[in-house]
Amino acid sequence: MRSSNPVFSRRGFSRDNGAYAGFGTQQPQAQAGTATNPYATNPYATDPATGMPQAPVRGNAMTIDDVVSRTALTLGTVILTAAISWIALPVDPANINKSYGIAVGAALIAFVFAMIQSFKSKPVPALILAYAAFEGVFLGVISSAVSAQLGPGTVVQAVMGTMCVFAGVLIAYKMRWINVNRRFVGFVMAAAMGFMLLMVVNLLFSVFGGGDGLGFRSGGLGILFGVIGIILGACFLAMDFKMVEDGVAYGAPREESWLAAFGLTMTLVWIYMEMLRLISILKGD
């Protein structure tokens, strides 16, 4: 099983016992019920039999600190460019379509950078930070537009909601209340594909038929799909935590921490946007 997150779709750590597969290429299966390490030749990987590093960890194996620092840098870039765009690109409520046009343009550029990185064999920090910068412009303009229409409290609530989801999933994962196994991943992937398909259909009906299309983004249905979107984001977050955990255990190269940061950033952006949309609907817009 692979994550739906483009960052994790081609690379990964996998377990032959069917528990989970994440970063990377599939490895030949070993004995049933044993773990196959994609980085088995790395002397700093964890020995599956003992759970201990096969050799003293030096400077080339990924650690949690690496993931935290890269994630902080990537998210910091998003936050900084969002703040700059909020200030430098003020929203005119009378000409709000111009702001939405800027936001869509920034989102498309960020998407291009994300796709280029997802097809690279190795992480490219410049691409990841460029994605983060344009994603920040998109979020800054969209958040400013929502704030102009519904008040600044809406954005604050969305940020706080995103932080609560992150903290809640992290606690639940660390306490092992969430078991990220093959069944979990399969269910989330199927639900995500169905969710995205419905959103695309709704968008097409909205573009060609006007209004809110099939009504998936307003009223009772909008609230329901907003909640579903946040739950899916939380599930992606748990999958990201699992892949980071496996990466550290398997002694993945330090550069893989950039991919982990990239994936976590994308998931948090997803959750924030769904949270912002849900709060906007609840406030009557």
Image: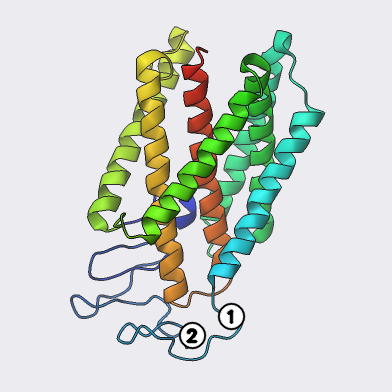
Q: Tell me which residue sits at (56%, 30%) in the image.
A: 157
104 displayed left or right of 206 = right
Total numbered labels placed on residues in the image: 2
**Could you say which is closer to the camera, residue 31 or residue 237?**
237
Name the outermost residue toward the bottom: 55
**Could you say which is closer to the camera, residue 239 or residue 164?**
164
Q: Tell me which residue sits at (41%, 44%) in the image.
A: 234
The amino acid type, in three-letter code, at marker 1 is Asn
The image shows residue 126, relative to residue 106, as above or below, that is: below
Q: Tell me which residue sits at (31%, 77%) in the image.
A: 36
Q: Quadrant where the N terminus lies?
A: bottom left
Disc 1 element: loop
Residue 134 spot, x, y in % from top left: 68, 40
The amino acid type, in three-letter code, at marker 2 is Tyr
Where is mark 2, residue-wise? Answer: 44
Residue 79 spot, x, y in % from top left: 68, 43
Residue 184 spot, x, y in % from top left: 27, 51
Q: Tell me which residue sits at (64%, 28%) in the image.
A: 143
The image shows residue 189, relative to residue 1, as above or below, that is: above
Where is mark 1, residue-wise? Answer: 60
Quarter where residue 262 is shown:
bottom right
Label 2 neighbour load within 10 Å: few <14, some 14-19, many 20+: many
Report the Cα–Cα distance between label 1 and label 2.
Answer: 8 Å
Which sits earlier in the primary sequence, circle 1 or circle 2?
2
Label 1 neighbour load within 10 Å: few <14, some 14-19, many 20+: few
Name the outermost residue toward the right: 88
Asked whether the beta carbons under mark 1 and mark 2 sit within 8 Å of each other, the answer is yes
Identify the mark at residue 7; answer none if there is no mark: none
102 displayed left or right of 176 = right
Q: How is the image coloured?
A: rainbow
